[in-house]
Amino acid sequence: MTSARPAPTGLASGARRVLTDNWTGSSTVPAPGLYPHQWSWDSAFIAIGSRHISPRRAQRELETLFAAQWGDGRIPHIVFNPAVPPAAYFPGPGFWRSSTAGAAAGAPRGVETSGIVQPPVHALAALLVHRADPRSSARHAFLARAYPRLAAWHRYLTGARDLGGGGLAAVVHPWEPGMDNSPCWDAPLARVEPAPPGTFRRADLDHGAASDRPTDLDYGRYVRLAADYRDGGYADGGAGSAFVVEDPGVNALLIASEHALAEIAALVGADASVHRDRAARMTAALVDRLWDPAAGLFLCRDVLGGGPIRELSAAGLLPLLVPGLPHGIAAALVRTARGAHFGLGHQTRLVPSYDLLGPAFDAARYWRGPAWFNVNWLLERGLRQHGQAAPADALRAAALETAVASGFAEYVDPYTGEARGTRGFSWTAALALDLAV
Ligand code: 2M8
């Protein structure tokens, strides 16, 4: 229990219903229709919530994802369900062709996956799932089996993905940081020649309003980047990649997860100091490379373009989650969150994904302004960690009310809380449940 105010009526039963309806027997879809497979960071957030319903089910959620890990350590961003018709989602297994195109990178043979990754929230999720029921966790050797998977995952991100050479993990596709059409990607994406419109069919528009989704031009560029990565055998570090970005959200989650991995290591009798040392080194690199004192925010860095991307994204607030963040920087982040760009606690119901005053702000369009529940859950946790109990309590109450009132929407208008995107969205339900208990 994090605050005295009770959760809104119907929250727990509604959230449980969403998570039960979206459970396939081995994992949970983000939402039927729009997202009919297993997504990586969705499953981490879902496990954080479903541990309150069934710790064993939360363990299974993560184990199903880990079973699709590649030999080089990457955890793919989608694990495809073979029972779902190929045309139901684009790009599907026939596009990624992981088991053949990813063979050199160690893609598994028995399951089809995408070849890119998503933010590494998994060690944090695994630790929280373990804590929900340590006896069930021990009985199933959950942490003992998860630890080598998670260690290999972090080695991949800090090794092959240190494409900028400065000690941070880089992303090679806008889908990797999970904030698909963030205005932060506009400049680096402008260098990418889009795949011609007639060469693919957007299944997402069968389920979502075009005005809530990325544009066709965005999709053309997403397809080009993914196809080029695939055609290069999903190898990292070649000359071919046209999009290489260091994102503060991805790296903050990696550092927070590295701290969690240190705790997991201690629990399974492995060396925790490797993880603590790496977390400290990455925290220094994060501050050194991405902190912008004038903006009072962490900025993305365009590795190929050679400089900071001057767009203010909620990803730049996520380092609040980093335990060892210098005090002055944490205080500046709180000021920025409460200021005119993000409006925490006065102008907005929930923190928007992008700068309220930014030229590209759009309250309806996906990651270009709407508020997302995972981002707000992470910020609530970060605020609390840095001693900001009052704004954390207020954010928690707003998230709970908005989750129920919106029908557990995928995202909402940050000012009004009006539902956007799909409804009955799994991580909204899961994280609301986690905030409520
Ligand atoms: C969205 O991304 C997928 C591609 O990965 C899509 O638009 O089809 C993003 O919101 C991403 O963060 C999320 O994990 C995924 C599934 O919920 O949907």
Image (cartoon, grey):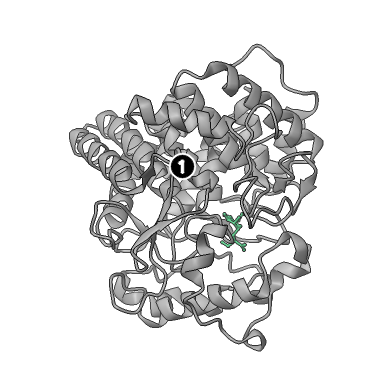
Q: Quadrant of the N terminus?
A: top right
Q: Tell me, yes or no, if residue 112 can be seen here.
A: no
User: Would residue 369 be seen by someone viewing this image from the given angle?
Assistant: yes
Based on the displayed image, in which of its 4 quarters is residue 131 positioned? top left
Count of residue discs: 1
393 vs 376: above or below: above
Residue found 72% across the figure and 50% down from its top:
363
In the image, 393 versus 341, the foreground residue is 341
Q: In this rendered view, identify the residue nearer to me: 308 or 38.
A: 308
- Figure quadrant, ligand 1: bottom right
- In the picture as drawn, the residue positioned furthest to the top comes out as 4
- Choose top left, top right, bottom left or bottom right for residue 195: bottom right
Q: Which type of secondary structure does the marked residue at label 1 adopt?
A: loop
At 24% across and 57% down in the image, what residue appears? 159
267 is higher (above) or lower (below) than 119 = above
Residue 33 locus on image (x, y percent): 73, 61
Give the side of residue 280 with respect to residue 31, left or right.
left
Quarter in which the C terminus is drawn: top right
128 versus 206 height, above or below: above
411, 105: nearer the viewer:
411
Foreground pick, 366 / 103: 366
Give me the residue at 43% from left, 26% from top.
331
The residue under label 1 is 295
Residue 212 position in % (x across, y down): 74, 59
Residue 72 position, x and y percent, is 29, 63
Name the residue at 72% across, 42% down: 18
The amino acid marked with disc number 1 is Ala
Query: How far across and how far down the image is residue 85, in percent?
Result: 67, 73
Q: Is mark 1 within 8 Å of ligand 1?
A: no
